[in-house]
Amino acid sequence: MSSESSSRASILFPLPLPEAFDYLVPEGLELGLGDHVLAPLGKRMVHGVVWGLKPGPGERALKSVEAPMGGAPLPAGTRQFVDWLARYLVQPPGVILRSVLRSAEALKPSPTETLYQVSGTEAPRMTAARAAVLDAALALGEASAADIAREAGVGAGVVKGLATAGALTTISRPIDPPYGIPDPEAEGLSLTMLQAEAGGVLRRLVRAGGFQAALLDGVTGSGKTEVYFEAIAEVLRRHPDGQILIMLPEIALTAAVLSRFEARFGCAPAIWHSAAGPKVRRRCWREVAEGRARIVVGARSALFLPFTNLKLIIVDEEHDPTYKQDEGLPYQGRDLAVLRAKIEGAMIVLASATPSLESLTNAQAGRYVHVRLPARPGSAVLPQVDTIDLREHPPEAGRWISPPLIAAMVETLQAGEQVLLYLNRRGYAPLVLCRACGHRMTSPDTQSYLVEHRYTGRLVCHVTGFSMPRPKFCPECQAEDSLTSVGPGVERVAEEAKHLFPDAKIEIYSSDSASGADLVDRMERGEIDILVGTQIAAKGHNFPNLTLVGVIDADLGLAGGDPRAGERTFQTLVQVAGRAGRAERPGRALLQTHQPEHEAIQALIAGDRDAFLETEMMAREALGLPPFGRMAAISFQARDVQAVEAAAGRYAAAAPLTDGVEIWGPAEPPRALVRGWHRRRILVRADKAIDISAYLRAWKSRVKIPPSIRVTIDVDPYSFM
Ligand code: ADP
């Protein structure tokens, strides 16, 4: 067993194991770092990645690597990213590797098809059928057996027979056409002065090389996309093999964005998002690993792709809450993108009209280059924002659109322009209760209110997906027809709009809509007069004929104790108002509110984002909250409420005492009971100077929690509530 040449490989598996394990490398097998192998783990053969190589057979008796698996090795940068993330996110490295590998199927070679061509060699036995095939093959050039057979009017067996006989040669060709080569010199829009200046700053950063970070801070509709296209073009010019990742919120990955890209660079990018089928994703993964995909447009999980030569990352709409993943492996995609850029020595551009406080702080501190675009191109101007005080102008009883908003809608529709009514509530009504006994319909699993969806006639739990038909009798007091719908959702506002404007074409756009892309197209073509939408409608779209945005409830989101609520509401309202007036026609936004004096609303009207953010920053700084301190959440879940309480209690008791760290809880988080799982949570706040990941790792190593309890550590919880 101990020959001189034998050596060991430590193999990391995409599993929640504490570390990589050592194996013997069988003689004659050459392994390199990042190679994919099969190795025995317990009774199974498991796909793992070579994480380290060591000389000699070592002291312990080791099992041997079974076989190499092929596929491009995992690049060094990607492996380093896995190791960094494991430490930063306080996770076993195999859990991060699992996010990178996704499915071992990515390793299968690209699918090919076999084509046939006349070889010039004569077939030994000529028949009429064979002669017909040879004629057909001559006429078709390279073609599949099925095509030749069809042309010749014979079975495909004859074609294959001729190949065996040597009269046809076979060629194997990849089925997927290669990704196109993007052309940096393709004709783009001619940039405005402001855009050209901003583009120039980004190009200079590309030329400087290495890790660079820029915050592209431009008002809605200012042309941020055109500006970051300049950075992309510069990377394409300077780095013939360089790769570029454009990250978008999942929802924004629409045909409109992709066609804009195609128009600028002359070919479609590779695409990575959850709705893309496994085939599309597999192909993307493989071509990224082989360095052939130059530009990837993807959602947050595209960060985990095995780039070989990443030069630029764009995070568009960087403030968007969907960059934060809460379930499974919790991470903030924007932060990870910055980390990845650092590891790869790449440049990163964070783009937004309403940057996160985190990114603004980094820009103000000089860690990011602050690139501003304060105006829209051409004659497009920012929408005029006004409030409608609902205390003075209440809608009719049981209605939600106030008289001043109705008047504005009349004007807009008469001018042949479009209206967006925004309400961030799916369904018909957020609550259904019994007029007779006051019973509220709640979800059996979470006790949260069931939301009425009139379109489907069901009551739905938005937490678990539980649903039931709307009952005829109150389940509590059995009264008949006593259930009443309370409050508005988009379906109800659409119903009201239909009642007010019977001739208008009205559509609802929410995550329940069958095809969002189709609605966006029809809206762009002017085939919809009034779009009633949730936040899905507020993001990134360009509707040139949209000139009025009515916000049904601007206060929604300002209530509650979440310190990020103000920032989030402000961002959403700026974005939704920003949908209006993106072309020649000026737009306006009307916010229905009960508290027009609230500072978020005041700042919106004044168009004074910086003043608003300044107050927010001061509040956060006073509390030591991000970005002025660090937060983490440790969650415990179990079927048994006593077990979860005991575990959370023991965990909290084991916290290392350190100056500058505060521990809150364990306490019941919102949704403390979901589908039979009880939850408890500990919140941790640390001063900026403290390495919170290291602190959490040290803490974790002090406690043993039984496997029946799920423990999740989130080093940057989005909501502190
Ligand atoms: P942002 O991302 O900043 O909201 P976009 O990049 O989506 O803005 O641009 C908004 C709209 O303005 C798009 O329809 C875009 O095609 C148009 N646009 C941007 N820059 C120019 C320009 N220089 N010339 C003509 N149209 C432009």
Image (cartoon, helix red, strand yellow):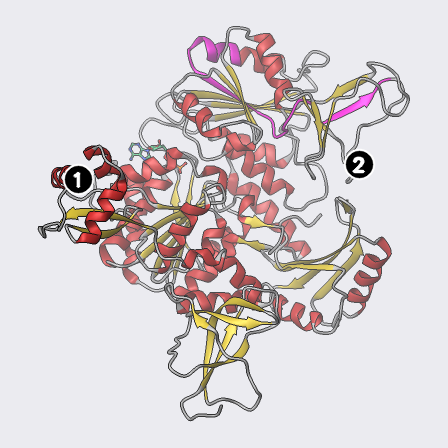
Helix, strand or loop under label 2:
loop
Going 50% across and 68% down the picture, which residue do you hit?
Answer: 48
On residue 444, the disc is: 2
Residue 649 at x, y percent in the picture:
82, 63
The answer to whether residue 143 is above or below residue 367 is above
> In 3D space, how far apart are the residues under numbered discs 1 and 2 (Cα atoms)?
68 Å
Helix, strand or loop under label 1:
helix
State yes or no: discs 1 and 2 in contact (Cβ < 8 Å): no
Quadrant position of residue 390: top right
- Residue span colored magenta: 409-435
Residue 149 as seen in the image, left or right of residue 380: left
Farthest residue to the top: give it.
Answer: 503
Task: Check residue 512 for magenta coloring.
Answer: no
Residue 531 at x, y percent in the picture:
51, 21
Q: Amino acid at mark 2?
A: Pro
Going 45% across and 42% down the picture, which residue do you hit?
Answer: 276
- Say few, some or many: other residues with alpha carbon within 10 Å of mark 1 (under 14 / 14 to 19 / 20 or more): many
Residue 86 as seen in the image, left or right of residue 271: right
Residue 190 visible in the current orientation: no
For disc 1, the marked residue is 133
Q: Amino acid at mark 1?
A: Val
Q: Nearer the viewer, mark 1 or mark 2?
A: 1
Task: Check residue 416 for magenta coloring.
Answer: yes
Residue 485 at x, y percent in the picture:
75, 20
Q: Earlier in the sequence, mark 1 or mark 2?
A: 1
Between 571 and 43, the one nearer to me in the picture: 43
Residue 343 visible in the current orientation: yes
Quadrant position of residue 135: top left
